[in-house]
Amino acid sequence: MNSEPVNAYKNLMVTGGCGFIGANFIRYLLKESDFSGRVVNVDKLTYAGNPENLADIEKRFPGRYIFEKADICDRERMASLFDDYEIDTVCHFAAESHVDRSIVNPDAFIRTNIVGTFNLLELARETPDRLQLFHHISTDEVFGSLGQDGFFTEETPYKPNSPYSASKAASDHLVRAYHKTYGLPITISNCSNNYGPYQFPEKLISLMILNALEGKPLPVYGDGRNIRDWLYVRDHCIAIWEIMKRGKRGETYNIGGKNEMENIRLVEMICDILDTHQKQEGGRPRRELITFVKDRPGHDRRYAIDFTKLREELGWMPEESLESGMRKTIQWYLDNQQWVNRVRSGEYQTWIKEHYG
Ligand code: NAD
Ligand code: TYD
């Protein structure tokens, strides 16, 4: 099995490429990076998957971008995709990703995040001569909650608190175990909260931007003092590609934005930037839309990432500050009203049914 870091990837399977980060990653890979191979995007197209996120890519890169609608839990189908496309590299994003949904209905999280990852690992293990790398995308939420001080490092013990983070933790352990037991060439990255273009409007930043534009209430959980570390999605994509090219096999890397902020401050910031772009009718400040609502059960208080390892080994640093990334993000949502309308109204789902059944 090849375990030397190389950049000779020819046939890269990206799972979950129609979701928020996966779509940004494929865009980065084909439009900006030095990757010269072919991307096979495998996505089940759940509510969070939208092939329209990559419609221009499909047109611009025929032959280098291929989409296959498939469920990573379907081992037979995934096996033929591995064979048909002679997959030599996997970048695994596909997951159920929203904590609130995992609290209401954890089943799909266990299935996709744990069983789906297991399936992919088994298939990767069956092609030892071909497989160069299995990169697993994970979250800082596996480490649990921090108090006022301290940061998550790669050595922090796992202590997940939600069904989502517990399912991601289980998948991380499986990936690591496949390296230790079978020598599978793997890397893992644990990243903080992402924001940016194409994010489905259920996560904090995308939801707040769209609600604020429509003059709807901005629901802030609990006292609004929970802290997240925010990373602009393109910075995440750059980090992933650097890890895939030069990361040490068998290792995990933390990725963070150095952008800690209390939720309430973040929502106020969104309101203020939007007010400078477009006043509300009557000129009332959007901060008036903020509504404190019942807290999320098991709500982690604070996440913060120490990414020294990534910086020192691979020279990665985030390019965007929270202010600059937020301005870009808000501008993107303002410039892409059609995307917003189709996602908000559910029209993209009708389109998916017509095109993919
Ligand atoms: P997302 O919910 O926007 O996208 C997930 C994608 O996976 C969708 O396109 C969906 O259709 C697809 N998918 C779901 N189940 C599938 C299945 N069984 N088979 C094939 N495809 C399936 O998620 P995201 O925010 O882009 O997150 C991507 C990855 O990054 C996840 O693994 C998540 O845990 C991780 N992550 C996310 C964040 C964040 O802030 N969003 C931070 C750190 C890590
Ligand atoms: P979220 O975007 O769901 O990411 P995660 O839970 O994975 O960190 O939530 C980010 C923070 O914002 C989290 O502390 C919960 C909070 N939040 C709200 O206050 N209101 C909301 O409507 C949402 C979706 C999240």
Image (cartoon, grey):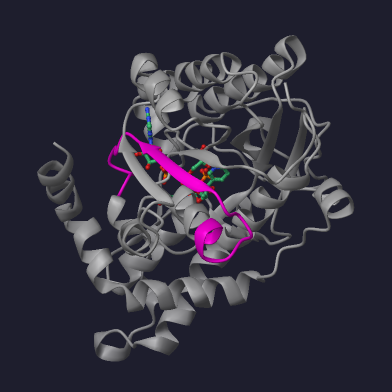
Query: Magenta stretch?
Result: 28-50
- At x 42% / y 39%, what residue is drawn? 16
Q: Position of residue 281 (x, y in %)?
A: 24, 86
The answer to whether 166 is drawn above or below residue 296 in the figure is above
- Left or right of 222? Residue 172 is right
Q: Position of residue 231 (x, y in %)?
A: 62, 58
278, 348: nearer the viewer:
348
* Residue at the outermost right position: 312
Residue 35 lies in the magenta stretch = yes
- At x 33% / y 57%, what residue is drawn? 58
- Left or right of 4? Residue 82 is left
In this rendering, does residue 218 appear at all? Answer: yes
Ligand 1, image quadrant it occupies:
top left
- At x 33% / y 88%, what residue is drawn? 279
Q: Position of residue 229 (x, y in %)?
A: 65, 54
Residue 95 lies in the magenta stretch = no
